[in-house]
Amino acid sequence: MSPAAAARRKQPEPAGLPDPLPEPAADELRLETVFAALADPLRMEVVRRLLLESEEFDHPCGWFGFDRPKSSLTHHFRALREAGLIRQRQYGAERRSHVRVDDLNARFPGLLDLVAAWNRE
């Protein structure tokens, strides 16, 4: 699957999901805020992997395998959620995330294609 096709892919939403944590509405997404969140390589990697490697609807922080303290990861995921890039839901003690594909593609066409094509090296 090409990066462009992956960036447009949306996992079907399962029934009975918990409500999402607070996030900006789609029409409140601001390009400079999204860019600021994506400026950090770890956060860019989170969004990229959710676009390209996601096999389920929501993924917990541990799915990424980052060797970082939990407090650091919490900060990064909160920055992505508050910028409007990801939607998070609370499942007991675990937060799971997915990219807001429809909202981002509607507001900033082509942005997720660029993120999917990004190569850290």
Image: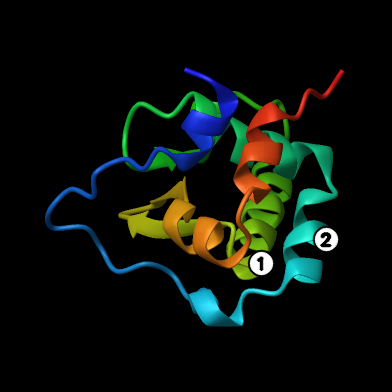
The type of residue carrying mark 1 is Ala
Q: Is residue 62 visible?
A: no
Name the residue: 32% across, 32% down.
56
Classify residue 64 by image quadrant.
top right
Look at the picture and state if 24 lies above or below 66.
Answer: below
Choose between 24 and 59: the one closer to the eye. 24
**If the image is split into quadrants, where does the C terminus sit?**
top right
Choose between 80 and 5: the one closer to the eye. 5
Side of 121 where 89 appears, left or right: left
Q: Is residue 58 visible?
A: yes
Name the residue: 24% across, 44% down.
12
Color style of the picture: rainbow
Look at the picture and state if 114 lies above or below 55.
Answer: below
Classify residue 104 by image quadrant.
bottom right
Q: Tell me residue 55's x, y (percent).
A: 35, 26
Crowd class of label 2 (few under 14; some 14 to 19; many from 20; radius 10 Å): few
Side of 106 where 69 appears, left or right: right
Tell me the element at label 2. helix
Q: Which residue is mark 2?
A: 36
Side of 93 where 100 appears, left or right: right
The type of residue carrying mark 2 is Ala
Q: Tell me residue 115's x, y (percent).
A: 69, 39
Find residue 83 and name its label.
1
Name the residue: 72% across, 62% down.
34
Crowd class of label 1 (few under 14; some 14 to 19; many from 20; radius 10 Å): many
Label 1–label 2 contact, CB within 8 A = yes
Name the residue: 70% across, 74% down.
30
